[in-house]
Amino acid sequence: MDDRLQSLSIENKQFEERLATLRSGSTGVKMSAEERKKIDAELDRILKEWRRRKRMFGDMWGAVTENIQGNLHELREAIGIETDEAAGVNVNGDLLKGFA
């Protein structure tokens, strides 16, 4: 048990050091303005598609469940539908919050 604890402590320290390096931005990887612009454009495209699909699902879910009696939250859970809100994600918010 002590060996496992010591091993996990060492591993945890290594992860903390790596995280500190990543947070400081000193990973040694340089990115040109053009690369950054390309990545930002791709992120915007992906977020736009995410919002579109979320809206489509909402419309379909509303149509399917408009005449259903009972708890819709329980129905979602029973059929395995996971929402962004349940996962703590807001597609309209700052998805990179806490990573800067």
Image (tube, helix red, strand yellow):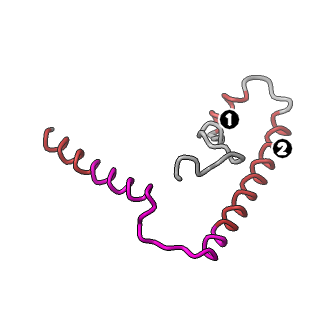
Magenta span covers which residues? 12-39
Q: Amino acid at mark 2?
A: Asp
Where residue 46 sits, quadrant-wise, is: bottom right
Q: Residue 12 versus residue 51: which sits nearer the camera? A: 12
Q: Residue 65: x percent and y percent?
A: 81, 34
Asked which secondary structure carries label 2, the reply is helix
Q: What residue do we see at 60% from left, 39% from top?
A: 88
Q: Residues within 10 Å of mark 2 (few under 14, many from 20)?
A: few
In the depicted view, which residue is nearer to us: 44 or 7? 44
Image quadrant holding the N terminus, namely: top left
Is residue 87 found inside the magenta-colored segment of the image? no
Q: Residue at x 78, y 54 (%)?
A: 52
Q: Nearer the viewer, mark 2 or mark 1?
A: 2
Q: Amino acid at mark 1?
A: Arg
- Using the image, tell me which numbered label, if any, was put on residue 76: 1
Residue wearing tag 2: 59
